[in-house]
Amino acid sequence: MLDFVQQLVSGVALGCVYGLIALGFVLVYKATEVVNFAQGDLMMLGGFFAFTFIGMMGLNYWIGFAGAVVAMALFGMLAERVVVRPILGYPQFSIIMATIGLGYFLRSIAGMIWGTDDLKIETPFSQGVLRMGSLVLAYDKLSVIAATMILCTLLYLFFNKTTLGTAMRASSENMLAAYYMGIPVKRVVSIVWAISAAVATCAGVLLAPITFIHSNVGLVLGLKAFPAAVLGGFGSIPGAVVGGVLIGVIESMAGFYLPEGWKDVAPYVVLLAVLLLKPEGLFGLHVRKKV
Amino acid sequence: MRFLFKIDYEDDIKLFPHSGYIVSYGILLALLLIAPHLLSSYLMSQLVFVCIYAIVGVALLILTGFTGQASLGHAAFLAIGAYTAAYLQTYNVPFPIYFLVAGALTGLIGAMVGFPALRLTGIYLVIATISFALIVEEILARWESVTHGNEGMRVKTLSLLGVAVPRDSPTFYYLCLAVLVLTIVGTLNLLRSPTGRAFVAIRDSETAARSMGVNVALYKVKSFAISAAITGFAGVLFAHKLSFISPEMFTLQLSIEFIIVILIGGTFSLHGAVLGAIFIVMIDPFLTYLKDDLPGIIAGIAATFGAGPHIAANIQSKVAAFASLNGLKGAIYGIIIVLFVLFEPLGLYGRWLKIKLFFQLFPLYKRATFKRQKIYVKSERNR
């Protein structure tokens, strides 16, 4: 039983990281109907930025964290301006390929700048555990869970309660109509990319104590975040986190109870099953096909 | 400018619309046939890879270019073809049989992937095919009784009708070339048949195709099966060319490379598959060449502009250090993909068509001829 709870908690913590990356997918998808295949790589880059600020320049953890978030938000806007804006309105396939290309580029550049070693960031959470009876919970995992919950709530409120959030949803439904209604669509898209890059940075920094930062971490985790986003219904903010947690728990359980090899495959088996049985996901909208 | 008068449907679907085609393709084929006598053994080896990549490119074009179903899982089909060949070889099955069996089995698995894919479009299909490829990769690594797991499998030398065909012999090149030509001709025939027309109709509008009486589900599955089967054939050749296969050769990276082949070549014509394959295979030797010679060239240029020998040597060592950085290849790949998507969405073949039209219409060519329309209204979610 104790093993089960222990696996459950580490699965939830891992799942929250998937959820945070999936949140980035969902944000961009919700606002622009674009799937950003470079989301994981933005997370990786955010981790490296934080490492530069905290590990190399010796800044305070929180200041470095904030600096990385701001830097990555600007970088997200730059990436949107250079790569995505010229091809908005073209078929999705073009945009998918462009973001795949962007991901390639970021991975190689990060490898060139920061090398190929695993890097580690010292955080206030990396030491110490919470003991509850015979249950041992590490602070770094708890910090990921807490941060995910806070970010998810904030983003959910932002999208559903603020004017800017409404503008984002409107431009996702129909860019042209949104533009006619006075929404500055270009700026909205730019802001969405900034937010999603900032969320990715949070994921990267929180992840640093659990799995180390290296140039391929984005690819590996980004691929795991797809099942999370699909399971939650591509386009639902709470869905992304719930999907991420489910995928994390499934992976963790499969690693513990099933024979070797299932751990890496289980998320994708679940993903295919979801796509077959309920393609709109747990929280997705079911939209009728229109001619 | 040449005007072709078409007086019935047969004229419209001719493989060679006029004699120019026969002459130019005849010359190309003749050059390819005498290539082993002209090119170095390294370039011949690259040419074999061009053939294999082009076969996969054609397969992917059938599915992605003409049926509109994106796939990032073709490395898995290639792997299934390669492993089937390697496995059957251990039972001394002759080449023609395991070649066909590999194609048939891959086609069958392709159809099995196609069935669930019926309900999926766009991004979901891409994600589903990625998952399929990752699962296949894991199975290859774990099913040790058949695939020998991560140790990989050795592939014996191909023997055709009792004659051994080493992987770097001209005969092996001719075999790959023959398979490529047969694939292209077969695909051209397929595309001008009712099946091919149905594929294109599904790509352009699924709803419209259905209302015209096209059985969308059947043709999507057919497209998946045909595409997978051709990739399976390519997999057999791939296994023989490499003479050793292991799961880490068939990663997502390879699937992305195949997509890049058709993206760079152009997704609307079979020419694209061949041009893209040439590009993607030849970029490696080209980058190596740049790495070796570019620093000297740049230093030479600097010297002619009045830089002293010390500065020139300094520049040379700086450029050499930059060129030998790890991961430069990945960065160049990324830049190339982004540049093609942004500036040349029709690919290399599209560029060729534009140049051709420029001279045909000179001086009346206008850029807007090839302009794509942007659609901001239609949400893919509501389609």
Image (tube, helix red, strand yellow):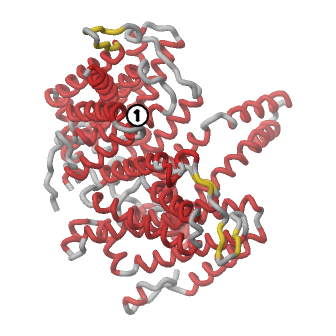
Q: Position of residue A154 (x, y in %)?
A: 21, 22
B197 shown above or below A133 = below
Residue of label 1: A221
Q: Is residue A55 left or right of residue A279?
A: right
Which picture quadrant has residue B24?
Answer: bottom right
Residue B206, by quadrant, is bottom left
Residue A180 higher or lower than B52, as above or below: above
Q: Residue furthest bottom?
A: B7
Which is nearer the eye, A274 or A236?
Answer: A274
Residue at 73% from the left image edge and 67% from the top image edge: B169
Q: Is residue B142 left or right of residue B274?
A: left
Q: Nearer the viewer, residue B264 or A121?
A: A121
Q: Residue at x 22, y 49 (%)?
A: A279
Instruction: Return the x and y of residue A118 as percentages of the image width and height.
Output: 53, 24
**Picture quarter with the C terminus of chain B:** bottom left
**Do we see residue A34 in this rendering?**
yes
Up the image or down, B294 lies above or below A14; here it is: below
Q: Disc 1 sits on a residue from what chain?
A: A
Q: Nearer the viewer, residue A77 or B289?
A: B289
Label 1 Cα crowd, 10 Å radius (few <14 / some 14-19 / many 20+): many
Residue A187 in view of the camera: no
Q: Residue A184: x percent and y percent?
A: 25, 36
Give SS at disc 1.
helix
| Above or below, B342 relative to A126 | below
| Residue A38 placement: quadrant | top left
